Image (cartoon, rainbow, N blue to C red):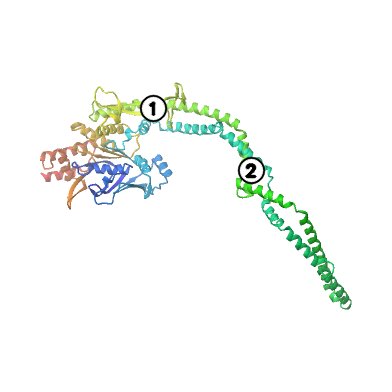
Amino acid sequence: MLAELYVKNLAVIEELRIPLEPGLTVLSGEEGAGKSLLVDALCLLLGGRASANLVRTGASSAVVEGIFWAPQDDTGLAAFLREAGIELDDDSTLILAREVQEHGRSTARVNGRAVPVSLLRELGHRLMDLNSQMEHLSLLNPQRQLDLLDGSGGLLEDRARLASVLAELREKGRDLAALTDGTAQRQQELLEYQVAEIEGASLQAGEDEALQQEWHILQRTKALKEGCHSAYAVLYADGVSASSLVHQAIKAVRGMVLIDPTLHAHLETLNSAAAELEEAARDLRSYAESVESRAGRLDLVEERLELLRRLKSKYGPTLENVIAYQRKASEELETLQNQEERRCYLEEKLRRLEEEAGRLAEDLSGARSEAAGSLTERVNRELADLGMPWARFGIALSQDERGEGLPTSKGRYFYHQFGIDRASFLGVTNPGEPLKPLAEIASGGETCRFMLAVKTALSRADAVPTLVFDEIDMGIGGRNAHVVGRKLAALARDRQVICITHLAQIACYGRNHYAVRKDVSSGRAVSRIEQLGGTARVEELAAMLGSPADRTMLESAQELLRRAAEGEGTNPQISQINSQITQIY
């Protein structure tokens, strides 16, 4: 429900804030007062086309904001908001805003977050139906027509079941196409090559680091060999060496031990040092010999490192990544090697899904045909009540036969997510004319009355919480206007209805009544809005009838309110109006 509308710098509207309530709200006013601008403001909120001409002269931008109470039981709206990433406040408030710059560009926001205009448009259509000069008219949208028809026949669960089967059908179809278009075969050949390449390398975790270290050593074999020989000569060469000097020290200490046995520990230390020096010298000589014998190892190490580098560049930054890639590729290869079995499974699954979807679509089509007949009958009764005696409403359901479509008992038909049917709402307003699509035959006011008839017939099935009617009174008057007013009031019992009207016979049924006025301030036209009650409302209705100063018109206005109150049960304003009208006289 629209709780508040705020408009700033929109043409002659300098600034307006309109609180709105459930039920029927009517707006009246003289031609050119700015009523149509309020419709333009609502169009902007619903993602309509923005124009620089709407910006008030001298202002940098025009702003329209609407505060909505989102229906808490609307699961479709809740899912849409979640998918769009829009968070609802605890009180389920949605604030839609549109700003139009003086150069024509516009921005859209929902709860303070900038969104594409397309998202604002889709969200707006879930919150409000605006029927004015063919703008945003859901009655003329083929998909919306199918939604209304299915809602009227209680078929939404059936078509959701069909949509689920069709979604699985498309998914399995894509899987089968991937198997049969050569993609899977090429993928299998690629995986076979990759697995063979990695397996042929016989990789060991961490070997690249070990090889890199060995490569650094092999790059310096000459220096290593010379260093080992030098160290060996210093430790154990003929003549003066570390080993011979230690042995001299041992000989000297051994003589001293004979004199002082406490020096025996030092003798053991020297003997141990001599043994360690001799072992170190032998190890260095052996290492030098091994370095010399590995002269051809460098080429092998470099070849292995190059192989590992190539594999890491193709399959992962580390050797561990390459080994993991091999495991994963082997698993995928095993799956693909069973693709023939998979293909047979998918073909059988597709056949069964097609049969199920075709059966569900055919059953749904039959149910739609029955629902179309019932809805057509109800709408035509409403049209007769609305003063359109020659008007007729109809619904055409069509299907396109197509070889690759869904199989039914009558053939194969093209399908979309909700079945094989296309719905078209038809109408005729003049006798002797054939039924044609509503967009081709109805004027703005007639279309609004068609919409009112459909909405009344679908009052329980249609979940849009706010309906706006403009020009619904075009070409009607007298008794028919009273009928339209009663229909609007009845429609507003379980939703919000906003009606812009020139007829007092309709305005009298409003639970709330606003008058749009145009004044001149500082030499410029400015629109303002006034909520009417009591005497002010009687006078406004009298003005709509002819003259607010005419006693007869005032009496007629009071009578209209009384009749409306009687038709709606009770009207708490009537006693107050009665006392005030006496004072006027």
**Image coordinates for residue 244, horizontal then vertical, percent:** 84, 70
**Which residue is depicted at the point 15% across and 41% down?**
543
Q: Which residue lies furthest to the top in this view?
A: 410
Do we see residue 302 in this rendering? yes
Q: Residue 362, located in which quarter of the rendered image?
A: top left
Give the structural element (helix, strand or loop) at label 1. helix
- Left or right? Give the position of 531 relative to 3: left
Q: Quadrant of residue 344?
A: top right
Out of 512 and 211, give the one closest to the viewer.
211
On the image, the x and y values in percent for residue 354 come to 49, 27
In front: 436, or 69?
436
In the shown orientation, is residue 121 left or right of residue 230? left
Mark 1 — residue?
A: 368
Q: In this view, does 153 lie to the left or right of 558?
A: right
Q: Quadrant of the N terminus?
A: top left
Q: What residue type is labelled 2?
A: Gln
- Dot label at residue 326: 2
Q: Which one is in front in this view, the residue at disc 2 or the one at disc 1?
A: 2
Decide which of 475, 231 is in the foreground and name it: 231
The crowding category of the residue bearing disc 1, from other C-alpha atoms within 10 Å (few below 14, some 14 to 19, many at least 20), is many
Q: Mark 2 or 1 closer to N-term?
A: 2
Query: Please, is residue 248 above or below residue 476 in the view?
Result: below
- Residue found farthest to the bottom: 259
Q: Which residue is drawn at 60% across and 30% down?
A: 340
Q: Quadrant of the C terminus?
A: top left
Type of the residue with mark 1: Arg
- One can see residue 513 in this view: no
Dot 2: element = helix
3D distance between C-alphas at marks 2 and 1: 55 Å
Q: Position of residue 325 (x, y in %)?
A: 62, 44
